[in-house]
């Protein structure tokens, strides 16, 4: 049995720290010693809305310490990144190549918002405890399905590796996998937080000729330039119809609008904004996962505009995580620079405060040995 300190949502909109007990991994599972866990807006939202107890966290990296039966191609001591969209490999969507929306394992499209097949593997005060997105990375140890881990074949540090499995993948994949931005294209990116910066990086790697970063913060716009933006537009809260923003983007794109535009703010009122920023027959991408109802002006779709809402950058973990790490090793993708600040588990609230105030691009919980 393993004892682990964990951050646990209380089911009432808050969280607390306590010790959990982990048993042996079941067949097809592995036990991970977590080294680092990213702090994500989704973690904060889940604490406030899921109304149940669970171990927080869905971004993580660590080391395998125990194997269940029938686990292949993994070994004790392997460094791994955790992936929350766990494919079963056999359902309709997996067979279609849509591993990120697996009908069996996906916590978003399948069996609920958080949980795990082997709930008895983790207990708190004698009762089974679920783990956020099947992972629960804000714990010193966790048990996950073997299909949820990807081996790290890189010298990357754990804090930088931990953020690959959500924010980096979502931004990069939305550009490369979903929109398929082409070399020479013009790209507008609305919102330059952690996800937006990875959209910018994905666009630069794809060879976009013009990358227009849009944000309310001058500091974030300056950071966007460091991550590959070629132009910046300072947004205005007093421009609710986005007239000034659209005018500036069109002025930078031959009066037509961008070829591609990405919404990365999670602000419902801006859900239709990328449609206003693209040219006719352009592609608008809603990256941030807005789930509220939004009213669309259908004239924004004129003419032949395409609007897509991909999940998790259409992640294929074995393919994409390897590519991301190769780009990192080649100096073409910034990950270390994304980690603005690290925290101990006990400092989680400070991490949330910094994230919500926009003081950091990405915060990471680091676990001491």
Image (cartoon, rainbow, N blue to C red):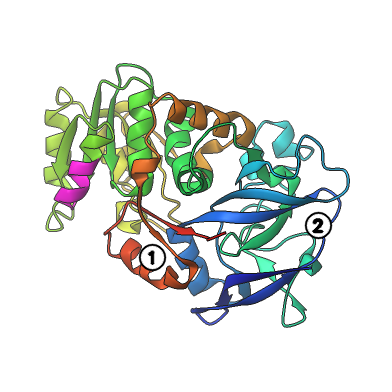
Which one is nearer the viewer's eye here, 194 or 235?
Answer: 194
The furthest residue to the top? 184
From the viewer's side, name the closer residue of 245 and 328.
Answer: 328
Q: In the image, 17: left or right of 348?
A: right
In magenta segment, residue 216? yes
On screen, residue 204 above or below 88 = above
Q: Position of residue 317 (x, y in %)?
A: 61, 36
Whether 330 is drawn above or below 293: the answer is: above
356 is higher (above) or lower (below) than 289: below
Work out which quarter of the rendered image holds the C terminus and state it.
bottom right
**C-beta proximity under 8 Å, tags 2 and 1:** no
| Residue at the image position 49 percent from the left and 68 percent from the top | 345
Observer able to see residue 75: yes
Q: In what quadrant of the picture does the N terminus appear?
A: bottom right
The residue that appears at 82% across and 42% down in the rendered structure is 71
Asked if residue 54 lies left or right of residue 46, the reply is: right
Which residue in the protein does label 1 denote? 351
| Furthest-front residue in this view | 369
Q: Secondary structure at mark 1?
A: helix
Q: Give the image location of residue 138, x and y in percent.
A: 56, 63
Mark 2 neighbour class, 10 Å CA radius: few under 14, some 14 to 19, many 20 or more:
many
Q: CA separation, marks 2 and 1?
A: 30 Å
Q: Is residue 53 magenta?
A: no
Provide the major secondary structure of the magenta segment: helix
| Magenta highlight range | 215-223
* Location of residue 215 in the rendering, given as x and y in whole percent from the top left corner: 21, 48
- Residue under the point 64% across and 32% down: 318
Question: Where is residue 240, by image quadrant?
Answer: bottom left
Q: Is residue 112 visible?
A: no
Quadrant of res 330: top left
- Callout 1: few (<14), some (14-19), or many (20+) C-alpha neighbours within 10 Å? many
> Mark 2 highlights which residue?
25
């Amino acid at each position: 049995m393993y004892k682990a300190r964990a951050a646990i949502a209380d089911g009432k909109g808050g969280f607390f720290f306590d010790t959990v007990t982990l048993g042996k991994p079941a067949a097809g599972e592995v036990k991970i010693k977590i080294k680092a866990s990213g702090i994500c807006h989704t973690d904060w939202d889940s604490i406030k809305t899921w109304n149940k107890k669970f171990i927080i966290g869905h971004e993580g990296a660590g080391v395998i310490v125990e194997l269940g039966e029938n686990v292949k191609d993994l070994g004790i001591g392997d460094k791994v990144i955790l992936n929350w969209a766990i494919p079963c490999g056999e359902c309709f969507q997996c067979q279609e190549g849509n591993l990120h929306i697996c009908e069996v394992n996906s916590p978003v499209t399948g069996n609920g918002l958080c949980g795990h097949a082997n709930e008895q593997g983790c207990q708190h005060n004698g009762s089974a405890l679920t783990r956020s997105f099947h992972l629960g990375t804000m714990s010193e140890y966790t048990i996950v399905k073997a299909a949820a881990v990807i081996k790290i074949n890189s010298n990357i540090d754990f804090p930088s590796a931990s953020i690959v499995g959500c924010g980096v993948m979502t931004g990069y994949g939305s550009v490369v996998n979903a929109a398929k931005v082409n070399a020479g294209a013009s790209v507008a990116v609305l919102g330059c937080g952690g996800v937006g910066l990875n959209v910018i990086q994905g666009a630069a790697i794809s060879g976009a000729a013009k990358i227009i970063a849009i944000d309310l913060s001058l500091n974030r716009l300056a950071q966007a330039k460091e991550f590959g933006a070629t132009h910046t537009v300072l947004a205005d809260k007093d421009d609710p119809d986005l007239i000034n923003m659209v005018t500036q983007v069109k002025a930078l794109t031959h009066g037509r609008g961008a070829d591609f535009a990405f919404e990365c703010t999670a602000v419902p009122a801006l859900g239709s904004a990328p449609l206003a920023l693209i040219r006719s027959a352009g592609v608008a991408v809603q990256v941030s996962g807005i789930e509220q109802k939004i009213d669309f002006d259908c004239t924004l779709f004129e003419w032949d505009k395409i609007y897509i809402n991909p999940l998790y950058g259409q992640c294929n973990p074995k393919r994409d995580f390897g590519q991301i790490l190769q780009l990192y090793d080649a100096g073409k993708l910034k990950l270390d620079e994304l980690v603005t600040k690290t925290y101990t588990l006990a400092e989680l609230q400070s991490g949330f405060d910094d994230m919500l105030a926009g003081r950091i691009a990405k915060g990471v919980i680091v676990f001491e040995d």
